[in-house]
Image: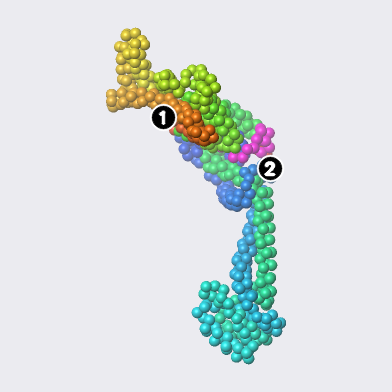
Amino acid sequence: MILEMDRVQIWGMKKYLEKVIPILHNFGKMQLDDIRNVPDAMVQPFSLTEEMQSEREEVDILIASINGLIELFSTLVKTEAQAPLTKDDDILGIKGKVADVTAQVQYLNNRKKTIQDELISLSKYNEMLNVIAPVMPQSSKKSGNASIRALVHTSQMRAMNMLAQQLKLMTRGKFEMISVRVGESTNAIIGIFPLEMISQVESFMKNEKVTQLILPEEYAYLSTDEAVQHIGKKVELDHQELDEIDARLERIAAQWLPRLRTWQLVCKDRVDEFEAYSKLGETEYTFTIFGWVPAENVEELRGIFASNFNKNVTVNVIDIPKELRETIPVATQNPDMVEPFENFVKMRAVPKYSDVDPGTLVAFFMPLFFGMMVGDVGYGIIMLVISLLVGKKVKAGLICDFLKALKWGALWSILFGVLYGEYFGTLGEVVGLKPIWFSRSDSANFTTLLIMALAVGVGHIVLGLLIGVWNSIVQKSRNHFLERGGTLVALAGLFLLGFSLIQKLPDGYYISGWIILAVGLVAMGVSMGGTGIIMGPIEFVGVIGNILSYLRIAALGLASVFLAKVANDMAGMVGSAIAGVVIALLIHSLNLVMGMLSPTIQSLRLQYVEFFRKFYEGGQSSFSPFKKRINVVFTPSNFKEMSKE
């Protein structure tokens, strides 16, 4: 059902505006019109104050910080939880808490980065020292000796040997050099010499531009073995600290992620309020708000404003200008069982405000056609179980809508399965279950099945045309009235003609049929203007094609029952009983999957293409009320408390 909408104007003194916007936000049932798009508004758009603009910028920055934390924390913990809103969760409080959490996270991430860089560096030193350690001579362990380490390219080893000879002369034969390869083209050089000559040796190496392997300061004066031990211990401690940082980040994420999601909504709600200000109109001392409210909620809105502002802010229902009648927002209200089908309708187009809401019709016909196609008790029960079990896991989205539709389609499938006598195809016959109506697997009933499908098509198309005629009267559209009414008349004439030809009606109806058919075609042609003499008959042929399209109900049903029959027959034709059962189960499974998808698509197609074209145009915008994202229940007393703050 499409709700009746009232156009509302709220007027008051500007000093109350900062209280009006939060109250409207909490009310959550009014769509605000942008004053710049209101043709009968005689006021200028509202301009945000510098203070408001500054706060808006701060909130935008705060949202960016919250989004970054949520993105990080979502990789650390898997939870969709959202914390309840508390009285401290205002923008100022949120800003301080987010700053604290951000500081903690930044410190831990910086510390983590420092340790990771240190581990990379230590791993390089450790790799080289582990290669060097086994070849270190005993002289390197003497307390009176020092050592230097250098890395040289393999091509420089000859020059390095010559330098070693010079160092031996300098140290009077007390310099000892060891070389070991640490890479494909790199050698590590270790020089051992008396400790008292360290400054001379280092100066010599520097003058000769030899690059020394300098360990971090804490390892610089340790022997190679000691350095390896200390580096190994440091690596172990670094890994322990990284694990502690990760665990601490996970604890922070688990603690704050649900609250961050709540704060994100609070901040977005505040941004929405700033956006609302920009849609208002103002004079020097007053403000004006235009918008739409469901008629059933107007008195509620008046009561809220009266209790908070007395007569200082007024709520008035005003006339709808002609230029706005095509832009009235559309809100629908239907039972829960209709909701998924309403979403299918909106996938096609949002209804026009003056349209008949097709949601309830689709909720009836789509599962009905599904059941007529599947028409099997066994498959219907399995589909029902699948829809109920999977539906507990999937709570929203297109899959959820499909599962809800599947549930009702499965119930109709069980009903038609009883009428057709089908239990996993022909298995019902084995245990003596007979059809109440007729069996689709019996070739003698093919004509009955086709007539049933065509009769359903005629009824569905005629209903669509009747609704179309009603819509054209409501919308005062002469052309639509002639087109849809003419189609109905032409169909009536065609049926009279057809039944006369097969002698189901007296001969006198034959001429009447031709006359009525001609009147209908003329009406259709007039609705189409100058080309109507050609387009009218062509359009009518298209309507006949639409009716024939309902034969797919019979075709898909036959395909399903015969595939099930093949599965049952294959089970008895295979030599091995186990192999036969396996093959039968595979074919039945394939048939089940096809039975869930293909009838859904085809029954939805019959709504979109054959049915909707007879009356449904859509194309209007959905009702989009100014409401909070976070679920908070506000009562009139809450509004009073807010207005006093």
On the image, the x and y values in percent for residue 129 come to 62, 73
Which quarter of the figure has residue 271? top right
Q: Is 643 left, or right, of 530 in this rendering?
A: right
Q: CA distance from mark 2 to mark 1?
A: 50 Å
The 10 Å Cα crowd at callout 2, few under 14, some 14 to 19, many 20 or more, is few
Q: Is residue 634 magenta?
A: yes
Query: Residue at 67% across / 55% down in the picture?
Result: 247
User: Colour mode?
Assistant: rainbow
Residue farthest along the front direction in this orientation? 575
- Span shown in magenta: 626-642
Query: Residue at 36% across / 19% down in the picture?
Result: 491
Query: Residue at 66% across / 32% down in the picture?
Result: 636
Residue farthest along the right direction in this orientation? 143
Name above or below for residue 483 compared with residue 212.
Answer: above
For the question of whether residue 562 can be seen, the reply is yes
Q: How many numbered discs sit on the rendered protein? A: 2
Give the labeled residue for mark 1: 609
On the image, the x and y values in percent for residue 419 come to 51, 20
Query: Residue at 32% across / 13% down in the picture?
Result: 501
Give the labeled residue for mark 2: 86
On the image, the x and y values in percent for residue 269 come to 59, 42
Q: Amino acid at mark 1?
A: Val
Q: Amino acid at mark 2?
A: Thr
The 10 Å Cα crowd at callout 1, few under 14, some 14 to 19, many 20 or more, is few
